[in-house]
Amino acid sequence: MRAFILGACALLLAGCGSSDDKQYIQDTDSGTTAISSESGQRILGVNSYLWHATLDTLSFLPLQSEDPFGGVIISDWYSSPQTPNERVKITVYILDRRLRADGLKVAVFRQTKSNEGWADVAVNPETAVKLTDAILTRARELRLATKQ
């Protein structure tokens, strides 16, 4: 009887989908993505190459929040198995719809664990620069791959 009820609930939930036929339209020149539906188009607020490159680059981190319309990706705290008493958190802001170096801001936070708990410590400024470079490089690769 439980299996029947669960099956009926699954069928009911499956029928709750939207009837809008959405299509994602990629503009390979500007890197913008529009969601087209019967009710009109809605353009994502950020460059999709930067968006996907950021997700690829930060794929080793657990993500806390992603907002493709606002252009913010926030990771959760991450500790490497090699350094369990140190953790990092990264926030990336995509500020433009164009694929530009100044359209990206990376903030890195670092904490170390002591007897009193986790405490904020200084981050090497080169860390954010290297992450920015890695994201931009990946975004260029994605752009070139879509033009072929």
Image (cartoon, helix red, strand yellow):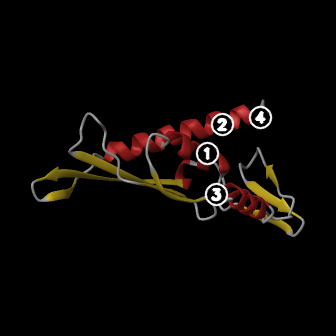
Q: Position of residue 113 (x, y in %)?
A: 17, 51
Q: Quadrant of residue 55?
A: top right
For mark 4, give the secondary structure.
helix
Q: Residue furthest bottom?
A: 39
Q: Residue at left 64%, top 57%?
A: 46
Q: Is residue 48 left or right of residue 120?
A: right
Q: Residue at left 20%, top 45%?
A: 85
The label shown at residue 135 is: none
For mark 2, give the secondary structure.
helix
Instruction: Report the front residue among 36 and 139.
Output: 36
Measure the C-alpha gap from mark 3 to mark 1: 10 Å
Measure the C-alpha gap from mark 2 to mark 3: 15 Å
Label whose residue precedes the other's in the sequence (2 or 3):
3
* Residue labelled with disc 2: 142
For mark 1, give the secondary structure.
helix
* Residue labelled with disc 4: 147
* Residue labelled with disc 3: 46
